[in-house]
Each structure stands twice: as C-alpha cells, then as structure tokens.
Image (tube, rainbow, N blue to C red):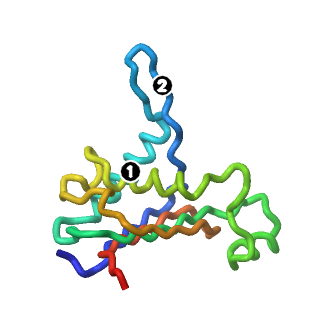
Amino acid sequence: MSKNPIVLIINDVKPQPKQRPTYNFKTRSAVTPKKTRDYERTVGVYARRFIKKEDVIDGAIKATMKFIFEVPKSWSKSKKEDALNGKIFPTGKNLADIDNLQKSVLDGIFEKEHGIAHLGMDDRQIVEVSAVKKYGTSNQIIIVLEEYNND
C-alpha cells in the first residue's frame, strides 16, 4: 500500500468534458461519442505510462484535480495578465462544467483497456473529490490521487 500521492500531469491536452451518450435504437445501447472516447483514451495512456504497480492505493482515495486552460490569444495583454493572476476564471459558455471534466478524466484514468484498471484500482474507491478550473500559459491537467485520511 502506498503512502505517497500519485501525481499525474498531462501537458498540452485541453481538458474535455464527458459528453452525453447517444442512444442506438437498433442495438438498444448507449454509445459514448468518439471525441469523449478519444480523450479518455489519451488520459488513460498517460495514466498507464506513469502510474505503476508500486503506486497502487488499496483503500479509499481522495482525488484532487486542476484543469488549466490556455488563455485565449485574442485577449488583451491586461486581460491575459488578470487571467494568469487568478482574477478571471474559465467560466464562459464554451467551457465545460467542472463535474463533466472530472468524470471524463477519472473514466480515462481508470479505463480498462488503456488506463490503470489492470493494477486493481477502481474509481469506486474515490470518496472525496476537489477540483478547480484556472487559466494558464498552456492547457494542462494535474491529478493527485492519495489515500483518504478521515481527519
């Protein structure tokens, strides 16, 4: 059992929300949109590459996520500075709800084919989640998984 937090940093990948599935009436099944599948696969590949067997957390997990969006190039210099200094947050109509960002990242990390499910960890172990959306100089996702401490 690991006492060290698992830190996963995904650079130059724009955070994407979990999209709603479409329903296929012929097969009577829900189908996850391709864009979401591709994004979750990308997150899963990062997770599988950097999270190893010795990192496994056996019990309850606390997940902390930071979703960093690149400041739009079209913004003025002062507006960019305000965004980078935490005075403006990514809350616009074209940016995702934070709960959908969390869902797509966690599904990607724990995905069976490309993620870390083969290590025996499962997203059902997560009992506490915190997340923030911020602006930065480039798109980035930072995830910290650690043993839950009930203090």
Give me the residue at 32% from left, 72% from top. Answer: 6
- Give the percent coordinates (x, y) of residue 71: 68, 64
Query: Are the two marked residues, 1 and 2, in contact with CB atoms closer than 8 angstroms?
Result: no
Q: Is residue 81 left or right of residue 2?
A: right
Residue that label 2 marks = 23
State the mark number for residue 40.
none
Give me the residue at 70% from left, 79% from top. Answer: 85
Q: Residues within 10 Å of mark 2 (few under 14, many from 20)?
A: few
- Give the percent coordinates (x, y) of residue 126: 35, 64
* Mark 1 secondary-structure assignment: helix
Asked whether 76 or 44 is in front, the reply is 44
How far apart, in angstroms, are the residues tagged by discs 1 and 2?
A: 19 Å
Q: Residues within 10 Å of mark 1 (few under 14, many from 20)?
A: some
Residue that label 1 marks = 107
* Mark 2 secondary-structure assignment: strand
Asked whether 112 or 137 is in front, the reply is 112
Give me the residue at 54% from left, 49% from top. Answer: 17
Query: Which quadrant of the rendered structure holds the N terminus?
Result: bottom left
Check disc 2 and give the amino acid type: Tyr
